[in-house]
Image (cartoon, rainbow, N blue to C red):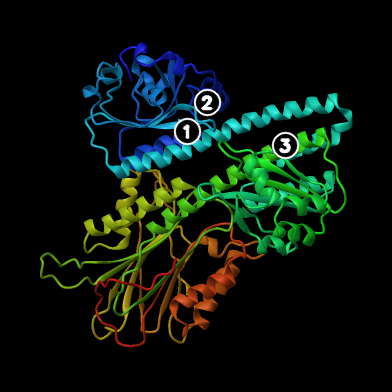
Amino acid sequence: MAGSDGDVPLSRLADEGRVGALRETGLSAVSDEGMERFARLAAELVGVPVALVSLVEPARQVFPGMVGLAEPWADSRQTPLTHSLCQHVVAEARPLVLTDAREDARTCESLAIPDLGVVGYAGMPLTDGDGHVLGSLCAIDTAPRQWTQQELALLEDLAAACSAELRLRIVSRQREHAYGVAADSARRYRGALDRSQLLLRAAAALADTTGLTEVRQTVRDLVISDLKPVYVGLVLVENAGKGRLRRLVDETGSAPMERAHETYDLDSGWPTARAARENRTITVTDEAELCQDYAPEAVEAFNSLGLSSAVCVPLPGTVIPLGTLVLGWDEAHEIDIVEQALLAALAGYTARAVERAMFVENRVTAARQMQEAMLTDLPAIEGIELAALYRPAAATDLVGGDWYDAYPLPGADQGGEDAPAPDVLAVSIGDITGHDLRAATLMGQVRSMLRQADLDHPGAGPARALAAFEHANTHLDIGASGTLIHAHLRPCPAPQEASWELTWTNAGHPPPLITTPGTPGRRLHDHGMLVYPGLAGPERTENRITLPPGSALLLYTDGLVERTGQSMTEAIDQTAQLLTGHSGQPLAELLDTIIDQVSAPDPGDDIALLALRIPAARPVRPSQAPAASTEQ
């Protein structure tokens, strides 16, 4: 943010390509759900009062994503450039990180300091596919701030994800424009009507794909009916720095050469590599041409597919091609000008679908790694066998709010360094509403707050800890909702010292399952209402039961027992039977058995399981240990 517009050359802000890209995002001084999510994540991840997704136009900056900005700026969602630090991020095309904006020569006279309260500032560039800096994702503190490397790395990663979202929006606008171009071509070239319709179908079909395998199958289904190739393949640049290509292998095994030559060098003698290397369409008209110009393994692969001709079309990327689209025919096939244009457009749609699929896969991987990192290892407790299992949904959703937890607590009478070992084991399982990064973030908060509530109320039961969490959830406006079970286990005194007392409270969660020696598995039905901020209801209640040696307890989330063609009651009964019938199986293996036999083959929701078993041998009081049997 500068004292005057002249501090930043207006020509940089008014660059035609940059301004055009801003327009293509469709974003302005209006709240946007996706951009709001990035602003909230930025504020939560680095702990700042203000976070913005700021897009810098030639005469103003606008905030489609905003957290913490005061009026009148919160209502207008824009400021003039006299109040913009983000213009420096755009002009310099690099991050701007300031401990104190009042002490930097570029920003010390900015009106943002007195009017917006900006002091500490960290802004990361938001770029389009051509490298134009459209604005910044910025974190703002109202006091001097020493930014840590971890905070800056988090902001940089989040800005990269936000930039990818902006690029997808730009591509979507361009796709809409392509619809118009394709429709106009159909009217002007009646002979090319069928192929123009192919482009329209491709734009729609590929826009809905989310995985690389799905992209390849969609392209194959699109072109086979119109162009009649006998082979359709995709080859992607796997590592541009090392010059490697990787085929998307057809898992049906219909093209064994794909597995035999799955990866190869970008500078190798394959026509697919040449198309990507030279960024132009390569045609192969017969085997003689292939033998003359390409490597023997390319000829062998060509013949193994029974091809007589082929075309290799580069997939356009921002810097270098993303890879190559390959079509092959078992007879001579001449590519005319109209078909070349068709294939070039199809390759463009395919490239955007590939980019989106790779982006989604990377986000899924990163988000699931984050969720799994929050599912901490189980403690080792003498006298109790513990095991847990988490399995993500088969769909391409990011992450969910399913979780489990187990931790030892000190007794109510402990107060000094010489206090005895912990004598209470707390266990929890829950499902926070939602199936996205926000649900996973809330899940982590709920787990931590329940732990804190247990520690802050020593000697109290699980219902008291749950009530304390709900109080904070409502009054701190955390917004977590869902179901959970929170329980405490305590070894029984003599003459039942081999047994454990289970005390639990159930907030609308599927019933726990319990087995005791000589009896079939059964449900613990007692439960209260689900967790929802501000929802009034009766006080949380607790239930108690004694677990004798040989008992087992299973906690689970609803993803285990929800499947088409079977009621939840039937699935829960089946789970109880497995819990009873496999009592001699190691607990971790038993969880694998349950999830494999009860859940759907492709579950539509995440599944979390937490089980404990009281050994038949005489237990010892619990104590913390460094390792545990936990499976994720």
Q: Residue at x 60, y 49 (%)?
A: 266
Q: Is residue 283 left or right of residue 602?
A: right
Residue with the mark numbered 3: 344
Q: Residue at x 62, y 45 (%)?
A: 354
Residue with the mark numbered 2: 27
Q: Nearer the viewer, residue 228 or 86?
A: 228
* Chain-order first, disc 3 or disc 2: 2
Q: Disc 2 vs disc 1: Cβ atoms closer than 8 Å?
A: yes
* Chain-order first, disc 1 or disc 3: 1
Q: Is residue 190 left or right of residue 34?
A: right
Residue with the mark numbered 1: 35
On the image, the x and y values in percent for residue 605 come to: 55, 57
Q: Nearer the viewer, residue 557 or 41?
A: 41
Location of residue 305 by image quarter = bottom right
* Residue type, label 3: Ala
On the image, the x and y values in percent for residue 195 come to: 82, 36
